[in-house]
Image: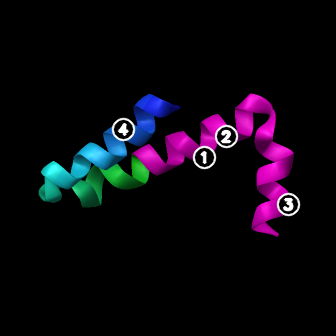
Amino acid sequence: MLDAVLRLLRLCDTPDDVPILAPLIKREILYRLRMNGSGSRLRQIAL
């Protein structure tokens, strides 16, 4: 997951890529959060 967060932060260096890549990386981060056992905690925070 750290790799995905770092990739998201590195997008600051290439602003033209943000509209395309940022949503994909955000989806990956949410997927990893849900799959690592923190899904119920994430759901509680969202509600």
Q: Is residue 46 magenta?
A: yes
Are the two marked residues, 4 and 2, in contact with CB atoms closer than 8 angstroms? no
> Which image quadrant is residue 46 in?
bottom right
Q: Which residue is mark 2?
A: 33
Mark 1 residue type? Leu
Marks 4 and 2, how far apart at CA: 15 Å
Q: Secondary structure at mark 1?
A: helix
User: Which of marks 3 and 2 precedes in the sequence?
Assistant: 2
Marks 1 and 3, how far apart at CA: 14 Å
User: Which of marks 1 and 4 precedes in the sequence?
Assistant: 4
Q: Nearer the viewer, mark 4 or mark 2?
A: 4
Marks 4 and 3, how far apart at CA: 26 Å
Span colored in magenta? 25-47
Mark 4 residue type? Leu
Q: How many other residues sit within 10 Å of disc 1, few (<14), some (14-19) or many (≥20)?
A: few
Are the two marked residues, 2 and 1, in contact with CB atoms closer than 8 angstroms? yes
x 42%, y 29%: residue: 3
Q: Which residue is mark 1?
A: 30
> Which image quadrant is residue 38 in?
top right
Q: Nearer the viewer, mark 1 or mark 3?
A: 3
x 51%, y 40%: residue: 28
Q: Which mark is residue 12?
A: none
Q: Secondary structure at mark 2?
A: helix
Marks 2 and 3, how far apart at CA: 13 Å
Q: Secondary structure at mark 3?
A: helix
Q: Please state the horizontal and vertical placement of residue 44, each as a whole percent of the image.
A: 85, 60
Label the magenta part by its dominant secondary structure.
helix
Q: Which residue is mark 4?
A: 6
Q: Secondary structure at mark 4?
A: helix
Q: Which residue is mark 3?
A: 44
Q: Please state the horizontal and vertical placement of residue 15, each as a whole percent of the image.
A: 15, 58
Mark 2 residue type? Leu
